[in-house]
Image (cartoon, grey):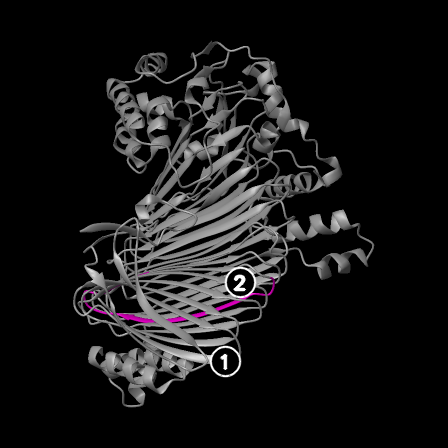
């Protein structure tokens, strides 16, 4: 058993809130995760393995490179019910779309390192199909160079523990981050997210959006930090979260943070957290929907939003199947 | 309260007057059990208070210095004198206060404000109150406004023992423990049931001694169906060594009562302001915090409200202006612990000339606070690219039956707005100062006129630097 400390808040706050980091006990990975890769011809996608020198943990390693034009890669990673690990490297000099499906029922660590070269793009679609009892730790680091765009769509439909540490550095001028996350956490499920956008270059742009629902004893922490570094003049950043609370036993923690060392920027953040109002329920009731039906529709709509944005039949099939089994 | 009408009339020296240290007694620097026992003996504490101080010291020694906020490396308690007694005991008439101390308060405008617009005044100089007075008409309504130490030995002794540091226990954080060990001075206010005090009470805290700490304790009890506006002001001359302010404010607000607590804080820029303020609010009660933070080298200041009764509410309105050499970490905390409670936090912060301003908040909605509503709004203005402004809000929601909203903005002064004012003959400097004063309007419009003028003048002073 290993103690993992992840999701560290870049600028800590009161200890009593218990949000400055996540400390979790983790079964030491026994080996590499099972990986399945399917790539367009133009995309170089190589599977293998690597060993972490410090921990001696064996990772399944996937290296994906796109040198020009556009292409896509589809990667399935699963823990096969054990404690496993995988490392993914993405480099794009063109327009790369990566569909990442993460499944299993054990404990899985996935490390992702991505680099978006100048004027290039990576579109990363993460679809989690891990079963309710499964656990996932994702540690992601992305550098975006001048004029590059990193677009990330994620769907986390609920597990006994999902921890995502997503750090994006907008290094070059006019680098862009677009992030949309959809989630559902139900009875006995926990989602712990830590997103950071370091805006370093001039006229960079970040947009972080989340939408989710908590039900039963579901717990969720979202830490979102936009950090305008000195010299990031002309940059714009925004983050927003919309959380629907469907039970009186949920726990929701939201920390939308802006750090700013630059005068000529514009940063905004907003959050809306709550249940369905009586007016909304009456509206639906007047159209023949019971409260249970409305709640089911709302949870399904979170999945539908993700599927619409992903615009990929295979991803949609998996996401809908997982959501239906849950809802 | 000094109230010049134009920025050009502002005289910074009113805050910077230094009187020669002609104290009656100054405790040696540092913090040991001997020092705490000596302080307790000097104060003629009852036994329970002496024991309380010593327990607090033990807690202080056990709790680590916070690692999540601005650096406190420049603060060495071994170099702070925790008790300085001025050469005057507490008087009920300004004529009896020694001339140099009286002149200091006159230049700050306190006696004048008392005559014009206050129901009672307490003035603390270093570690002790030197003046306390309350209008007869207020006393006749049963309102008690006195120094805490007199109250500790008088009619209200049992009540104070019951309430003192129960809202802010010494175990709350390191500087609450420090306060518990060395507190001195401060005020006790008791407003009986049904009494509506139309004009405010004010306490003013002045720290003159170099390398000293001020640890006043304010305890206010507002019974059911009552109203009180309490104003707190503070300032100090600047020295080249650290001074420390670790006061404590505890507010008990009864059923359907309203307590408005206004502060214009203008400590000198060598001050570590580690103040703790907390209110608990019963059913239908309301707390209104109005807070302007302009001074200090380093501040940790987050007034907290616990909404303990159904339909209780709180509104926090604050502004922080961090200039050169300042690191001001301010905000508010709210705990919703009863159904249908509501909170509104509305703040502005301004950073200039290398100043660091951090807005930090926490809104917690407990499981039993069904039907509660919370809203947080913070706006920050960056006036140059060598300053820093951070917003660190947190929301912790434990029930599905609630509505919580949060919005924040950070940005700069619009060139268009400056251009518009300049096209109407206003200089760029005045245009920027006007825009910043407008930005701070959320607080100034909540203050009595004299204090709003002082606050606007403090902004003008900072803008001219």
Q: Tell me, for residue B140, which label it has, or none.
A: none
Residue B165 seen in the current view:
yes
- Note whether B62 is above or below A117 in the view shown: above
**Image x and y of residue B444, in percent:** 59, 48
Q: Secondary structure beneath disc 1?
A: strand
| Quarter containing the C terminus of chain B | top right
Q: Secondary structure beneath disc 2?
A: strand
Circle 1 chain: A
- The residue wearing badge 2 is A237
- The residue wearing badge 1 is A70
Which of the two discs, 1 and 2, labels the residue nearer the N terminus? 1
Of B408 and B155, nearer the camera is: B408
Of A311 and A254, nearer the camera is: A311
Query: Is B460 a magenta residue?
Result: no
Q: Nearer the viewer, mark 1 or mark 2?
A: 1
Residue A161 seen in the current view:
no
Residue at 53%, 18% (x, y): give it: B209
**Residue range of the region highlighted in magenta in the rendering:** A173-192
Does residue A116 appear left or right of residue A124 in this picture? right
Does residue A222 appear left or right of residue A321 in this picture? right
Of A228 and B444, nearer the camera is: A228
Would you say the residues marked 1 and 2 are in contact, meaning their CB atoms lie under 8 Å apart? no
- Note whether A134 is above or below B323 in the view shown: below
């Amino acid at each position: 058993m290993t103690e993992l400390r992840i999701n560290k808040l870049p600028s800590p706050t009161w200890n009593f809130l218990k949000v400055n980091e996540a400390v979790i006990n983790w079964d030491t990975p026994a080996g590499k995760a099972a990986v399945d890769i399917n790539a367009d011809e133009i995309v170089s996608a190589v599977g293998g393995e690597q060993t972490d020198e410090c921990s001696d943990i064996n990772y399944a390693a996937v290296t994906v490179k796109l040198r020009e034009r556009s292409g896509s890669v589809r990667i399935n990673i699963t823990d096969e019910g054990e404690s496993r690990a995988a490392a993914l490297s993405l480099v794009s000099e063109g327009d790369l779309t990566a569909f990442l499906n993460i499944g299993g029922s054990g404990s899985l660590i996935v490390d992702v390192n991505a680099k978006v070269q100048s004027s290039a793009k990576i579109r990363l679609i993460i679809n989690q199909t891990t079963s309710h009892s499964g656990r996932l730790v994702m540690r992601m680091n992305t550098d975006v160079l001048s004029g590059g765009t990193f677009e990330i769509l994620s769907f986390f439909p609920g597990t006994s523990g999902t921890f995502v540490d997503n750090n994006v550095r907008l290094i070059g001028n006019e680098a862009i981050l677009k992030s949309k996350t959809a989630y559902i956490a139900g009875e006995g499920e926990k989602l712990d997210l830590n997103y950071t956008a370091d805006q370093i270059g001039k006229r960079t742009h970040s947009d972080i959006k989340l939408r989710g629902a908590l039900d039963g004893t579901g717990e969720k922490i979202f830490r979102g930090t936009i950090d305008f570094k000195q010299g990031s003049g002309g940059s714009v950043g925004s983050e927003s979260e919309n959380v629907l609370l469907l039970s009186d036993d949920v726990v929701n923690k939201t920390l939308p943070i802006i750090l700013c060392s630059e005068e000529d920027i514009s940063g905004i953040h907003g959050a809306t957290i709550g249940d369905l109002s009586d007016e909304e329920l009456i509206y639906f009731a007047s159209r023949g929907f019971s409260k249970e039906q409305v709640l089911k529709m709302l949870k399904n709509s979170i999945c539908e939003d993700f599927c619409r944005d992903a615009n990929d039949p295979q991803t949609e099939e998996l996401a809908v199947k997982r959501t239906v089994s849950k809802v | 309260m000094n109230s010049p009408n134009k920025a050009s009339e502002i005289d910074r020296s009113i805050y910077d007057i230094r009187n020669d240290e002609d104290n009656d007694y100054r405790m040696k620097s540092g913090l040991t059990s001997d020092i705490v026992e000596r302080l307790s003996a000097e104060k003629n504490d009852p036994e329970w208070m002496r024991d309380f101080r010593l327990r607090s010291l033990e807690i202080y020694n056990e709790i680590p210095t916070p690692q999540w906020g601005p650096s406190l490396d420049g603060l060495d308690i071994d170099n702070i004198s925790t008790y300085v007694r001025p050469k005057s005991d507490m008087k009920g008439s300004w004529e009896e206060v020694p001339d140099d101390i009286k002149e200091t308060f006159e230049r700050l405008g306190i006696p004048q404000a008392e005559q014009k617009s206050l129901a009672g005044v307490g003035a603390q100089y270093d570690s002790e109150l030197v003046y306390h007075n309350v209008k007869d008409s207020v006393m006749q309504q049963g309102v008690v406004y006195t120094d805490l130490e007199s109250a500790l030995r008088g009619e209200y002794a049992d009540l104070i023992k019951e309430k003192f540091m129960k809202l802010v226990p010494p175990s709350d954080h390191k500087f609450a423990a420090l306060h518990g060990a060395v507190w001195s001075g401060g005020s006790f206010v008791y407003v009986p049931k049904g009494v509506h005090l139309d004009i405010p009470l004010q306490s003013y805290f002045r720290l003159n001694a170099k390398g000293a700490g001020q640890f006043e304790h304010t305890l206010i009890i507002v019974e059911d169906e009552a109203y009180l506006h309490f104003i707190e002001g503070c300032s100090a001359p600047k020295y080249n060594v650290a001074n420390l302010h670790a006061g404590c404010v505890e507010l008990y607000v009864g059923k359907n009562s309203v307590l408005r607590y206004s502060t214009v804080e203008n400590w000198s820029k060598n001050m570590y302001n580690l103040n703790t303020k907390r209110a608990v609010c019963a059913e239908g009660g309301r707390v209104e915090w109005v807070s302007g933070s302009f001074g200090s080298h380093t501040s940790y200041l987050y007034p907290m409200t616990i909404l303990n009764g159904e339909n209780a509410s709180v509104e926090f309105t604050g502004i922080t202006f961090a200039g050169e050499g300042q690191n001001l970490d301010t905000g508010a905390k709210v705990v919703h612990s009863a159904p249908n409670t509501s909170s509104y936090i509305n703040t502005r912060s301004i950073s200039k000339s290398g100043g660091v301003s951090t807005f930090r908040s926490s809104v917690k909605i407990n499981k039993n606070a069904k039907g509660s509503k919370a809203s947080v709004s913070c706006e920050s203005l960056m006036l140059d690219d060598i300053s820093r402004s951070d917003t660190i809000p947190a929301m912790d929601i434990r029930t599905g039956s609630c509505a919580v909203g949060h919005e924040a903005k950070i940005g700069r002064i619009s060139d268009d707005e400056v251009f518009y004012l300049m096209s109407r003959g206003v200089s760029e400097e005045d245009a920027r100062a006007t825009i910043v004063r407008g930005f701070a309007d959320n607080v100034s419009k909540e203050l009595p006129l004299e204090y709003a003028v002082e606050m606007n003048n403090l902004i003008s002073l900072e803008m001219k630097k």
